[in-house]
Image (tube, rainbow, N blue to C red):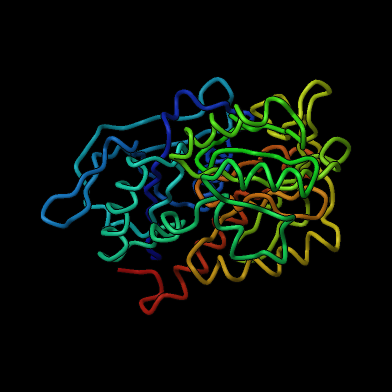
Amino acid sequence: MPKTTSLAVVMDPIAKIKFAKDSTLAMLLAAAARGWQLTYFEQSDLFLRDGVAYGRGRPLKVFADPSRWFDLGEQALMPLGDFDCVFMRKDPPFDAEYIYTTYILERAELAGAFVANRPQGLRDMNEKVFTAWFPQCCAPTLITRSASEITAFAGEHGKIVVKPLDGMGGKSIFVTEKGDKNLPVIIETLTDNGARFAIAQRYVPDIAATGDSRVLIIDGEPVPYALARIPAAHDNRGNLAAGAKGVGRELNDRDRWLSAEIGPVLAERGMVFVGIDVIGGFVTEINVTSPTGIRELDAQFGLNIGDMVIAAFERRLAARPNGGTR
């Protein structure tokens, strides 16, 4: 009789997720449908003891029911390395606590678990800075602490977007331009008067009409549809959390080229489920921590992206020297 695959998920409190929108739940439902055994952890449940990664986990059952989507069993102490797969789905902020968590997960990886996305990659690939590894895919971009450099960048490009390197959900994103009297205070705020790095990108006007498109990439290959986040009429931000509208569309040739440039590199580095953000054919961010958009695309195109992700995990496990068994 084949062995049941065990999956440990590290996520935000499951009772507080939005049933209709949560991508993690979509993937857990797909894993359960394939017969995987699920165990639930929150970040605070994890710890290291003498170099061994442990967690206080609870057996998890999930249901496609908006009134009751989960059930948790009794908590027990478990070595994380004993799981076949550990799935890191804790949402940002990507702060020191997140980094410490990746160290714990890396110890689980060294003990034999397949960890997605790979902990070292989560540490190495800041979602905004890592675009620098693919300059051919991006609009002109500057990462600096210097007010004079950002001011000169605005003078060169006219209109720019400035944002922090550790932001999420559209927070603290500013659209400004040459001659804007608010530009100095924007720079002071984002760089903390030169103490912190910020990122500036040339403004791509396509965002107003075609939005900020999330292209999901599973083990190097793109899902055939993207989710365009169209900003509200009163806003510049293409973020669902900031009120943008999610509209699905087929990938175009540029999307496929961008995916071919970025996807295989990320897959080789253990990043199995990622999302790239595309505005006007340019990549603005590479999301490796907790990409979303599954539920919206599933609903609009009759997909099951969660199952595509879990199938990719199964292929990874099967390709291991022991065939994924212990």
> How many numbered marks have been drawn onto this rendered protein structure?
0
Q: Is residue 322 above or below residue 278?
A: below
The spot of residue 201 in percent (x, y) is: 69, 47
Q: Is 117 positioned to the left or the right of 215 in the image? A: left
Residue 273 placement (x, y as % from top left): 56, 55
| In the rendered image, the vertical position of residue 186 relative to residue 326, given as above or below | above
* Residue shown at the point (71%, 25%) measured from the top left: 181
Q: Quadrant of the N terminus?
A: bottom left
Residue 46, horizontal then vertical, whole percent: 26, 42
Q: Is residue 250 visible?
A: yes
> In the rendered image, which quarter contains the C terminus?
bottom left
Residue depicted at 67% across the width and 41% down the height: 151
Above or below, comparing residue 212 to residue 222 in the picture? above
**Residue 67: x %, y % from top left:** 55, 20
Residue at 50% from the left image edge and 45% from the top image edge: 197
Q: Residue at x 63, y 52 (%)?
A: 142
Residue 4 visible at all: no
Q: Residue furthest bottom?
A: 321
Q: Quadrant of residue 160?
A: top right
The residue most toward the left is 50
Q: Quarter of the image holding residue 112?
A: bottom left
Q: Residue furthest right?
A: 209
